[in-house]
Amino acid sequence: MQRKQHRFGEAAVRDRSSGLAGAFAAANRREGDFREREAGNKKRAKFDSQTWLLLIVNGLFAAANALSGTFVNVYLWKAKNDFALIGWFAFANQLTMGLTFWLAGKWVKEHNKMNSLRLGIAIAALFYSLVLLLRQQSVHYVWLLGSVLGLSSGFFWLAFNVVYFEVTSRDNRDRFNGWAGLLGSGAGMIAPWISGFLITRMPETSGYRLIFGVSLAIFVVGVVFSFFLKKRKVSGEYEWTHGYRVLTQPGGPWKTVFGALTAQGVREGVFGFMIGLMVYIATRNEMRIGNFSLITSAVALFSFYAVGKWLKPAYRKWGMLIGVVMMIAVILPFFWRVNYTTLLLFGIGTALFIPLYTVPMTSSVFDLIGQDRESAEHRVEYVVLRELGLNVGRMFGTLVFIVVVSWTTAPTAINWLLLGIGSSPLLAWALMRGKLVTVQSDKFR
């Protein structure tokens, strides 16, 4: 499934926010506290135990989803060969995720954000429990299943991204995103291969039930690990209409940023479920999906490590453009032929260049959130706004996909659809190119 994607690099945590909460609560301590934070920028470039622990939780979440995520779509496809059905499953996920972000923002800002993270993991376990319970009848409950998955993603990623902002600075944000992508790639390299191996060697759907059960167990372990994360202090009241006010502010940067996030989401919404499904349709073999993930994730593992280590903020603009152009270029071989070779070429090319796109995009948006005290005070609202932008794009891209495949599933039409949707990152770069050089060094985090 989507996220995590990676989400590729959307998260992190450290235990420095206690000073932030105290600073905002006691005005007479604010300036001294901020000066202390500014002086500690270089020290914050290193990760502490809480940061590594959250990376582990993220890795477990990614591993469980990588183990079963792609194969849920294949499972539904085998029950009913219907592209539109798969699209509606994704749309239900995206719609519920966006609503969950907006509604759960009050809980995360005013109460315990760590419980939101744990609830997200627990609901993911519920999702796989439902799939195990419904079995082949799952195809008749795609809206229910998609909505449960959306709830899981919304609760988890909202809490995760808020903590990520609180504990990273521009000095280590790219590095953390690189590590998160590295762990996600490692999970994506090993888990789907194991899944494909088991599915192809067990009768009928027994392999699917096994991997869904293992994913359930990993999510339970993730919940256990999350209790070792320290409870983080909260401050302020959640403003329900803050995002609307920011978007309608004359001359403000967020209208452009929201457009870029929407463009980013268009591609994510479709490619997140379509590529793995295309590999299965082209090969009719789940093991080939596992091999595909093994190869492409191995490339991504190296690429995310390199980008996280060497891509400096000053190089984000042109690095991101190179990534975008190459991500579009690797779609073109589909017009010659869609087979395992061209799909593998696409996968390797995307894995190699997508970190150049996602790492600067993610880091720059969070840099913008940390540019001044007012932004930092509304970090939850800004994270919600960011996720709403992504989900608006995902839903738009998925609806376009559903409309096209409901009209025709001709290979040429599908290829043009993928090229059009896959070119949306170019719009994201065009809108963000003036904001890819970092703002102030997170003095007000």
Image (cartoon, grey):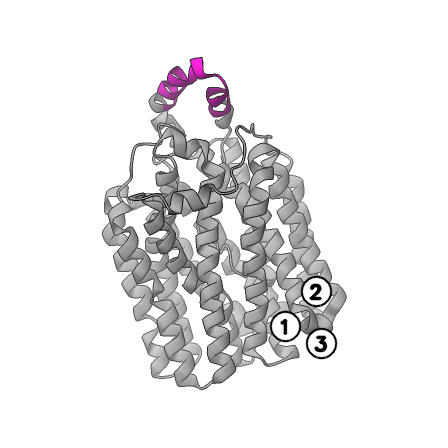
Q: Residue at x 26, y 59 (%)?
A: 322
Residue wearing tag 1 = 75
Q: Closer to the N terminus: mark 1 or mark 3?
A: 1
Q: Nearer the viewer, residue 118 or 99?
A: 99
Q: Residue at x 53, y 45 (%)?
A: 158
Residue wearing tag 2 = 131
Mark 2 residue type: Val
Q: Quadrant of residue 36?
A: top left
For residue 358, above or below residue 171: below
Q: Residue at x 53, y 28 (%)?
A: 235
Q: Split into 4 quadrants, where in the image is the C terminus? A: top left
Determine whether the residue tagged by mark 1 lies in a helix, strand or loop.
helix
Q: Residue at x 49, y 43 (%)?
A: 241
Q: Closer to the N terminus: mark 2 or mark 3?
A: 2
Q: Nearer the viewer, residue 251 or 374?
A: 251
For residue 191, above or below residue 288: above
Which mark is in front, 2 or 3?
A: 2
Q: Position of residue 207 (x, y in %)?
A: 68, 69
Residue wearing tag 3 = 203
Q: Nearer the viewer, residue 403 or 133?
A: 403
For residue 10, above or below residue 300: above
Q: Quadrant of residue 40?
A: top left
